Image: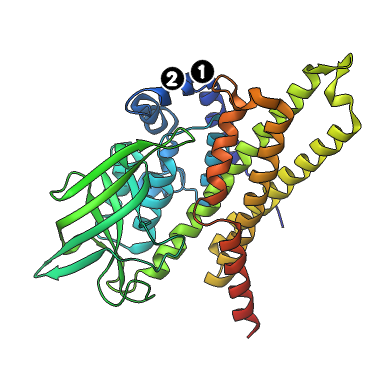
Amino acid sequence: MDFNFTDEQSMLRDTVASYLADHYAFDQRRAIVAKEPGWSPAVWKAFAEELGILGAPFSEELGGLGGGPIENMVVMEEFGKALVVEPYLGTVVIGGGFLKHSGHPRAAELIGAIVAGEAIFAFAQAEPTSRYNLAHVATTAKQDGGSYVLNGKKSVVVGAPFATHLIVTARTAGASRDAQGISVFIVEKGAAGVTTRDYPTVDGNRASEITLENVKVDASALIGPADHGLPLIEKVVDEAVAATCGEAVGVLRKLHEGTLDYTRQRKQFGQPISAFQVLQHRMVDMFIGVEQSISMTYMANIKLAEADDDRAKAVSAAKVQIGKACKFVGQNAIQLHGGMGMTDELAIGHYFKRATLIETAFGDIDHHLARYEFLSLGQAA
């Protein structure tokens, strides 16, 4: 299988890396997350107008660059290296993914707004008791003539504090864990009945607890088929997991590189601690974890175009490896730095915090192992 990037993809990587090196250095990023609103509208505008990367996975007909999942992965890896907090995942990957795959009548219009940096999406799917089960949806959407009325609560909606639109999963039929009866809606965040409680997350991002109380939306807000939205949700979430794995690769690279640099400078008994064989073995194990994560991530993104079960297996396999690597590489990076590794002034602690949250994003290791096993048994049968 060819893991080489095209010239266009390499150019995209270089463009993003160059911009972030000049405008998103560690101290600049710290300043962005330390104050309100917790992100940089100026940087987001530059992503849209100067770099054009908000159109990376969209067709040229929609105003994009004609790319797809690989382009998302390339962008997300560079974002991981710089710990970018701007809402590319929620807006371009998830919001754009729902619009692309659903055939929604307003898809071209809304994707155009995404590419221009005008529309920002957040994915309101998780609920207080849902864990990682995409079918566990207790939020309801009751049909009322030509409209729907939504009621429910959504938890840890990353990027919601600065979103203009929410992608909301809601139950239009059945019980709270039924696979059937789930629908997906576009809800303007400023709609009557939408209330949020915003807060910072441990890794420097911002999220919200969202309450929907008699939120009335037009039937045109429905994305995809009514009552049968779960396959669409699973497809888009798999794309989001694959993109998050790309971000994780960037984070893991920086954790490993930062640890190598530190151990070459830190001296004990008159020599750099990198000269100690036991620590060399540890750093080799970290390197192996990073390289395995790169390979699995590339494979998962390539397989996003395959049949549902093959796609899902590749994505879950990659997420298991990423989860293991985030834990092993992250914890060893902190251990080799000592207590100073967790100080706010040192970058390594910020990468560790992001790696820790990625480890559980969209499902932890146990969840994706169980999913992989279930899919494998189903195919074997």
- Residue denoted by label 1: 27
- Residue 31 bears which disc, if any? 2
When asked about the image quadrant of residue 97, the answer is bottom left
For the residue labelled by badge 2, is the local secondary structure a helix, a strand or a loop? helix
- Residue displayed at 41% across by 23% down: 34
User: In the image, 150: left or right of 32?
Assistant: left
- Tag of residue 224: none
Looking at numbered disc 1 in the image, what kind of residue is underneath it? Asp
Colour option used: rainbow
Classify 164 as above or below 178.
Answer: above
* Residue lying furthest left: 145
- Residue 74 visible in the picture: no
Q: Amino acid at mark 2?
A: Ala
State yes or no: discs 1 and 2 in contact (Cβ < 8 Å). Answer: yes
The reply, left or right, for residue 258 in relation to residue 100 is right
Report x, y in % for residue 141: 21, 66
Return the residue nearer the eye: 353 or 284: 353
Q: Going 56% across and 24% down the picture, which residue do you hit?
A: 18
How many circles with numbers are drawn on the protein? Answer: 2
- Determine the CA span between mark 1 and mark 2: 6 Å
Viewer-side residue, 65 vs 352: 352
Q: Is residue 101 left or right of residue 215?
A: right
